[in-house]
Amino acid sequence: MEIIIKRIGWFLVFFIVQILLLNKIHLFHVATPFLMVYFIMQFPLTYPRTGLLLWSFFMGLLIDISTNIPGVT
C-alpha cells in the first residue's frame, strides 16, 4: 500500500511539473520534453504490463486534457 501511495505522489508531482513548466519549453521550436516517460521508466521490470499501461494511459489522458490538445501532435 505504501508503494502505491508513493507512486500516486510522484504521479502528481510529475503531472504538475509537466503542466506548469515543461509544456512551456519548446526545444528548437519543435519538441516539448515529456517527464511522463521518465515516470514510466521508473517502474520495475516485474511490474504487470496491464498496470503499466493503465498508469501510462491516465498520465497521458490527464496531460492532454489539462493542456487542451487532442493527443501528441
Image (cartoon, rainbow, N blue to C red):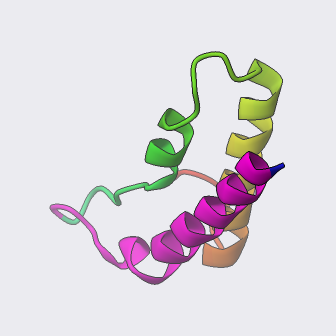
Residue 46 position by quadrant:
top right
The answer to which of 73 and 42 lies nearer the viewer is: 42
Residue at image position (52%, 65%) is 14
Give the residue at the far top of this rendering: 46
Q: Is residue 27 left or right of residue 16?
A: left
Residue 27 position by quadrant:
bottom left
Instruction: Please tell me whether residue 10 is drawn above or below residue 16 in the rendered image.
Output: above
Q: Is residue 50 left or right of residue 18?
A: right
Give the residue at the far left of this rendering: 28
> Percent position (x, y) of residue 57?
74, 44
Q: Is residue 43 magenta?
A: no
Residue at image position (76%, 58%) is 5
Residue 45 position by quadrant:
top right
Q: Is residue 17 magenta?
A: yes
Residue at image position (44%, 45%) is 38
Q: Give, as a single range, the part of the protein colored magenta.
A: 2-28
Q: Is residue 44 left or right of residue 60?
A: left
The answer to which of 17 and 26 lies nearer the viewer is: 17
> Percent position (x, y) of residue 18?
48, 69
> Percent position (x, y) of residue 12?
64, 69
Residue at image position (84%, 49%) is 1
Instruction: Please tell me whether residue 64 is drawn above or below residue 1 in the rendered image.
Output: below
Report the magenta stretch's main SS.
helix
